[in-house]
Amino acid sequence: MRKPFSASIIILLFPFFIYAQSIVGKGKAVDPYHYTIQKDKTFSKGAVACAHPIASKVGAAILKKGGNAIDAAIATQLALAVVYPGAGNIGGGGFMVGRLKDGKTFSLDYRETAPAKASRDMYLDDKGNAQSNLSQYGHLASGVPGTISGLFAGMKYAKLPFKTLIQPAIDLAEKGFTLTKAEAAKFNNAQNDFKKYNTVVPVFIKEGGWKEGDTVVQKDLATTLKRIRDKGAAGFYEGETAKLIAAEMQRGKGLITVDDLKNYQTKERKPIEFDYKGYTIVSMPPPSSGGVLLWQMLKMVEKRPLASYGFETVKSVQLMTEAERRAYADRAEHLGDPDFWKVPLKEITSDTYLTKRMADYDSTKAGNSSGIKAGVVESTETTHISIIDQWGNMASVTTTLNGNFGSKTVVGGAGFFLNNEMDDFSSKPGVPNMYGAVGGEANAIAPGKRMLSSMAPTIVLKNSKPFMVVGTPGGTTIPTSVFQTIVDIIDFKMEPADAVDKPKFHHQWLPDELVVEKGFPENIIDELKKMGYTIKGYNVPGYEVVIGRVELIKVTDGKLEASADIRGDDTVAGF
Ligand code: GLY
């Protein structure tokens, strides 16, 4: 069990005190100038865990005000778009998996889509080489944003008016909030990119650099949020905001048009649901690979005595690595947007198939990835929100701009970053991308198509009752991090904080290497090397691998044990 962690950010700015008190509602203050990071806490009624303390507190304040988990998820996402602009967004997309107190489960797919003018070979040069700079940076990298559509689609499960849910974000953008040390550093690291990929100077550029405690005010973003408050989804997809996005695209030679925006639609999909050792796992279906990979990996290890192997032993790590290897091999071959590609979901998740998949498993040596198609690799900047309310409604949301600050382009006059999600497509099916991995035909670019994701917002039930909400950012490491967290809790009976914080490992078939986090036991690394594994990511000077930033809420004896990842400013809040 980790030690209690509490980093305080106390910036005494008394003139702002009155405003701070008014956020969310009188007497229910979220103070954007004085806040603390709380890693673990047990709450009795409602809990939120997410990547930024202010956003967690906004979510908790909505729960206290009588909102349900979906209300809080909407308000938290909007707050993250202001205080955590590297991944929180209105210019990106995401997925929400929910479970209502009456037992209904649902999933909302508000993943970005390729613009109508996108084409399969749009990132290839005249020699046929993939130009990853174009799919990763600037205007051409952006898919049509889905977030605002998704939040409005979620309103059918919410209780409070949208105006109430968006107001904290408007206040935070209009009147400002203070930066944490980590956020200031992220802004500073991206200054050159902000200068390079913008046609209008964004507020995030600061000569001399940002420091902890600086106040960030985003007037243009506040105006955009007010248009959304007053006009609904049309305040983003039509009218002034749509015009500003289209104008930005024209200035920077991007593809998104006002018609692309008007045509964007969220899809409500049947969630992935399966049993693991008597627990029901509910997760995101394609176009995310997250839920399918989780299903495959958990089922591949289910019949083996993991609990007796123990946490982070050679036996458990090797078994789970081989399950990861096999699941990721299926990803590129079979997974893509189900509206464009026939995903053989039944076949690749059947018990017979998964038993066969492990038939060549050898517990004494490393498997072999050669000759098998592999998955694409996504960037790691995404963010997750876990919420449970006083009635037992559960919301698990993962949302992303893809890279840190997405395409790095801020829509001139509208104040928000656009995603670089087009890079999650396979620019050139069958050929290794910049990470040495290859993608398949299933994930080739086509107009209106959703790019394959790894996001795995997940809910776990026990005896049909709420047990856990879990999820994480981390690109292709998302399914493996959620997989390991579930096994840590269910098989190894670990405390939530340990399951969240202990070093993780990741294998994605190709490249054929096992990536481990700092702190992973050296003796296990040595044993695995002897078995033939190539181990990466530890002891590399200046290069510290981070796998996951898990947000977890577990129900224990009717109480909500919330745990936010030690790897960032992540914070829990509740009551
Ligand atoms: N861009 C990260 C993901 O969708 O998996």
Image (cartoon, rainbow, N blue to C red):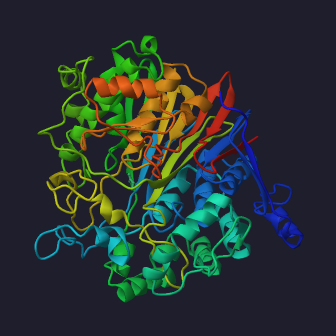
Relative placement, left or right, of 314 versus 204 is left
Would residue 54 be found to the left or right of residue 330 on screen? right
Relative to 226, is 514 above or below? above
Asked if one can make out residue 284 in the rendered structure from this viewpoint, the answer is no
Question: Residue 402 in the image: x percent, y percent?
Answer: 41, 60
* Numbered marks: total: 0
Q: Is residue 249 left or right of residue 32?
A: left
In the depicted structure, whether residue 235 falls above or below residue 514: below
Q: Residue at x 22, y 55 (%)?
A: 443
Residue 200, given in percent of the width and then of the height, sits at 50, 87
Taking 245 as reference, is 482 above or below it?
above
* 499 left or right, relative to 25: left
Q: Residue at x 19, y 39 (%)?
A: 344
User: Residue, x 34% and y 21% (percent of image)?
Assistant: 301
- On-image quarter of the N terminus: top right
Q: Quadrant of the C terminus?
A: top right
| Residue 303 at x, y percent in the picture | 33, 14
Report which quarter residue 477 is drawn in. top left
| Picture quadrant of residue 155 | bottom right
Q: Quadrant of ligand 1?
A: bottom left
Q: Decide if residue 454 is in sight here.
A: yes
Up-down relation of residue 271 to residue 172 (above or below): above
